[in-house]
């Protein structure tokens, strides 16, 4: 095992470092089949009017990013379903289920599929294990191709699921006539920039994250904020922190801060912000600063952690893309890992958690 880890101190470090190369490999495979719709057609999936993404933990967060791609790029109504709560979900007719599961063995997902699949338009599985139970149930399976992930807290499989899922989304939109080919080609070009963006994010973050962690080592609670496409990344950052550092972390859409969680902020409270360039963030953050909170921004140039590049060929406000600043996950992963290591914890095997949970 030590050999496989190579020079890395732990599997989590190795798996975080692998992300740019994995992104490049996935895109080498998929890019020729995105803008002509052939990736989607090869899945032989049914026609759909809506998308429901289904998953647990980090895979559900990846699903939420993919749902945003279907919505923001193609105007498709989407819903995200927490697998363990699927019995509470009423699907609109014409809903295609996109099930996300790294292991493909999560009991909550299999149970959710028992309930939802019969009333859906069909099922597409995105998994890191094409021989798994979830994959065997689905007529259409996409391998997210991240290679084995050993760290219990998912890192590279999040990136692999998002890239694979967004590629599927773009291909589906063009194959079903919702976007034209030149638009699909532009969106594919954006995807191709991701390996470089992830590599840049790694380099920048490794330089600045340790110093930031120094300042917040003794803090017991952390708040993660975002707006729009940034919210799910705030959620994933808070999840990583909880999983491996055992510190309390809350995530919120930044606009909700004033409706409750602002009461948690006092002198030195760390508030980590995924800054997607939304101008409304500034007033939310000045509320934090006015109460002595320690604002740590992850965004473009001028941010505390300037790890986010411009992922769109036609930048929107602040230059961030429409479906999510994927490279923002890198500093969030490194932040959680660095904090956990400094607290003397095993980042690969957090207490109470399992890599794959086969009980409901
Ligand atoms: C467990 C793992 C998480 C993972 C979740 C879903 O809780 O500890 O890291 O995100 O299961 O797993 P799956 O294999 O379905 O993606």
Image (cartoon, grey):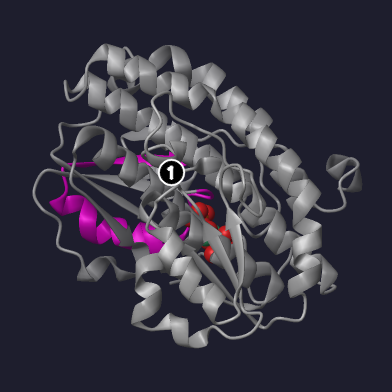
Q: In screen coordinates, is 98 left or right of 225?
A: left
Highlighted magenta segment, given as a residue range: 102-129
Instruction: Using the image, determine if residue 211 lies above or below residue 24.
Output: below
167 vs 202, nearest the viewer: 202
Quadrant of residue 160 within the rendered picture: top right
**Is 127 within the magenta?**
yes
Name the spot of residue 62 as percent of width and height, x first.
Answer: 45, 49
Name the spot of residue 51 as percent of width and height, x first.
Answer: 23, 45
- Mark 1 lies on residue: 324
Residue at (77% x, 75% y) in the render: 217
Residue at (61% x, 23% y) in the render: 25
Task: Please rate how many residues cluster around mark 1, counting C-alpha atoms within 10 Å: few if below 14, some from 14 to 19, many from 20.
Answer: many
**What element does badge 1 sit on?**
loop
Label total for image: 1
3 vs 257, nearest the viewer: 257
Name the spot of residue 187 as percent of width and height, x first.
Answer: 38, 23
Quadrant of residue 5 within the rendered picture: top right
Q: Quadrant of the C terminus?
A: bottom left
Say if residue 346 shows up in the picture: no
Residue at (37% x, 18% y) in the render: 186
Q: In screen coordinates, is 334 left or right of 183?
A: right
**Is 201 within the magenta?**
no
Instruction: Using the image, determine if residue 105 lies above or below residue 27.
Output: below
237 vs 356, nearest the viewer: 237
Say if residue 151 shows up in the picture: yes
Q: In screen coordinates, is 159 left or right of 205?
A: left
Instruction: Using the image, determine if residue 258 lies above or below residue 254.
Output: below
Name the spot of residue 50 as percent of width and height, x first.
Answer: 17, 43
Residue at (76% x, 81% y) in the render: 218
């Amino acid at each position: 095992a030590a050999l496989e880890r190579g020079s890395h101190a732990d599997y989590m470090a190795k798996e975080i470092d692998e992300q740019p190369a994995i992104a490049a490999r996935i895109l080498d495979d998929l890019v020729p089949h995105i803008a002509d719709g052939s990736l989607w057609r090869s899945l032989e999936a049914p026609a759909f009017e809506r998308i429901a993404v289904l998953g647990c933990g980090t895979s559900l967060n990846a699903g939420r990013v993919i749902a945003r791609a279907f919505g923001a790029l193609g105007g498709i109504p989407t819903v995200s379903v927490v697998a363990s709560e699927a019995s509470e979900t009423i699907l609109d007719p014409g809903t295609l289920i996109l099930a996300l599961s790294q292991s493909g063995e999560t009991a909550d997902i299999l149970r959710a599929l028992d309930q939802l699949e019969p009333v859906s338009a069909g099922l597409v599985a995105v998994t890191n294990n094409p021989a798994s139970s979830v994959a065997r149930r689905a007529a259409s399976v996409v391998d997210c191709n991240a290679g084995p992930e050993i760290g219990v807290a998912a890192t590279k499989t999040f990136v692999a699921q998002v890239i694979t899922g967004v590629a599927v989304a773009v291909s589906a939109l063009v194959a079903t006539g919702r976007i034209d080919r030149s638009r699909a080609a532009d969106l594919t070009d954006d995807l191709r920039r991701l390996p470089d963006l992830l590599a840049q994010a790694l380099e920048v973050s490794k330089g600045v994250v340790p110093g930031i962690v120094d300042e917040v080592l003794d803090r017991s609670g952390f708040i993660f904020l975002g707006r729009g496409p940034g919210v799910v990344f705030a959620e994933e950052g808070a999840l990583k922190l909880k999983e491996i550092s055992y510190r309390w972390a809350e995530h919120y859409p930044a606009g909700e801060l004033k409706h409750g969680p602002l009461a948690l902020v006092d002198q030195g409270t760390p508030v980590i912000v995924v800054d997607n360039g939304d101008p409304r963030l500034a007033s939310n953050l000045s509320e934090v600063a006015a109460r002595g909170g320690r604002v740590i921004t992850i965004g473009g140039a001028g941010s505390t952690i300037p790890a986010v590049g411009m992922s769109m060929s036609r930048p929107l406000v602040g230059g961030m893309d429409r479906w999510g600043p994927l490279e923002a996950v890198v500093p969030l992963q490194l932040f959680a890992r660095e904090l956990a290591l400094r607290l003397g914890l095993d980042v690969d095997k957090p207490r109470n958690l399992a890599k794959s949970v086969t009980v409901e």
